[in-house]
Amino acid sequence: MNNNTKNCFSVDVEGFVESNLQSFHIPEKYISRDKENYEIEKNVNFILSFLDNLNVKGTFFFLGRIAQDIPLIIKETAKQGHEIACHSYEHKRIFGLTEIEFKENILYSKKSLEDISGTAVYGFRAPDFSITKASLWALDILKELGFLYDSSIYPIGLHDVYGIENTETGIHTLPNGLMEFPLSTMEVFGKSLPFCGGGYFRLYPLSITEHFIRKSNSNGSPCMIYIHPYEVGNEIPQISEMSLYRRFRHYYNCKDGYKRLAKTLKSFDFCTVIELLKENQFVDLKLQNNSNIR
C-alpha cells in the first residue's frame, strides 16, 4: 500500500425501524414490513444512481430477509457492479442468538443472496457490529460457511453495545484464516475514536472525518466508510415519540447526507471490500479469475 491507498465504501442495507428496535422503544404503529421495504427500495435506488454518477462501486451488506421480500433491489445492485455481502437474516444482535440460530440464519441468508444476485457472497457484517467478546464464536461459523472476510469488529471500548477494546485496528488474518476488516478508528489522546461511518460520519464535522481518512491513508491504512440507506436517501420515518436526544442522534445531517457523502467520495479513492482485499493480496489471488467477483 502507498499514499494512493484505496478505501472501502459500504452500505448496511436495512430499514430505519428494524435497525433501531433493539436500541429504543418504537411504538407499534410505526412497525410495518411493507413500509420498511418501500423505504429500503426507494433509498437503495437513490444510492445506486448517486454512486453511478460518481463512478464509485461499493459493498452492500444486505439482510437476508431482503432477498425474500424485495429481491429485485439485490439483482439491480449486483447488475450495477457492486459487491453483494451478508448482514445476517434479520437485524438482530449476534450475541442474543444461539450458535445454532446464527448458523441456520447465515447459511440461509448467504445462499439466498447468492441465488438472487448470481454472485458469490464473501463478506459478512453483523447487525450493530455485534461480534463482541461475547460472540467471537460467530467467526468460526462464518469461516465454516465459506465466508472470506468479516467486517463486524469495532476496535473501541466506549460504546455500550459493540466494540472490542485493544484489538487490532488494521486488516488482519484471524487465527481461523478468516480476514477481518475492522471498522475505522483513529487514536486520539491514547483512545481509539470511531469515525467514518453511520452516526459518526453524520455527527463529526466533515473536515475532521476527512483529516482522519487522509492521516490513515498516509500510513498506508485503508478506511471503511459505512452508511445506512436512510442516511442518504429521501425516505426516513419520523417518529415523533423519540426523545430530543434520539432525534438528534438519528436524524442529524440525514437530510443533506448525500451532499456530505459526495464530497468525501470525490476526495478519496474508494472500491469494494473484495477488490481491495484482492489487490493487496489479503485473499487468494485465484479469486481474480472468478467471474463472480466484480
Image (cartoon, rainbow, N blue to C red):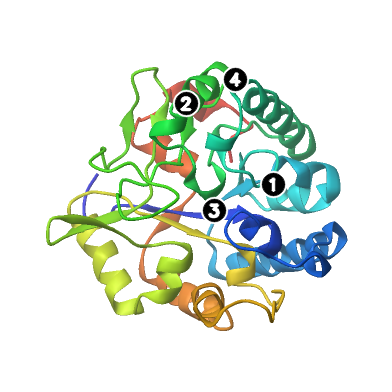
246 or 112: which is nearer to us? 246
Circle 3 — which element?
loop
Q: Earlier in the sequence, mark 1 or mark 3?
A: 3
Residue identified by numbered label 2: 139
Q: Amino acid at mark 3?
A: Gly
Picture residue at 77% right of the left edge, 43% below the top: 65
Q: Residues within 10 Å of mark 3 (few under 14, many from 20)?
A: many
**Closer to viewer: mark 2 or mark 3:** 2
Residue 273 vs residue 160, the one in the foreground: 160
Q: CA distance from mark 1 to mark 3?
A: 10 Å
Question: Which of pointers 1 and 4 indicates the residue nearer the eye?
Answer: 4
Which residue does the image show at 48% across and 46% down from the upper left? 129
For residue 24, side relative to residue 245 (left or right): right
Kindly report the distance in space between the C-alpha atoms of the residues bearing marks 3 and 4: 23 Å
Which is more N-terminal, label 4 or label 3? Answer: 3
Q: Which residue is mark 1?
A: 78
Query: Which mark, residue 145?
Result: 4
**Residue 290 appears at what percent x and percent y?**
58, 27
Q: Is residue 61 above or below residue 282?
A: below
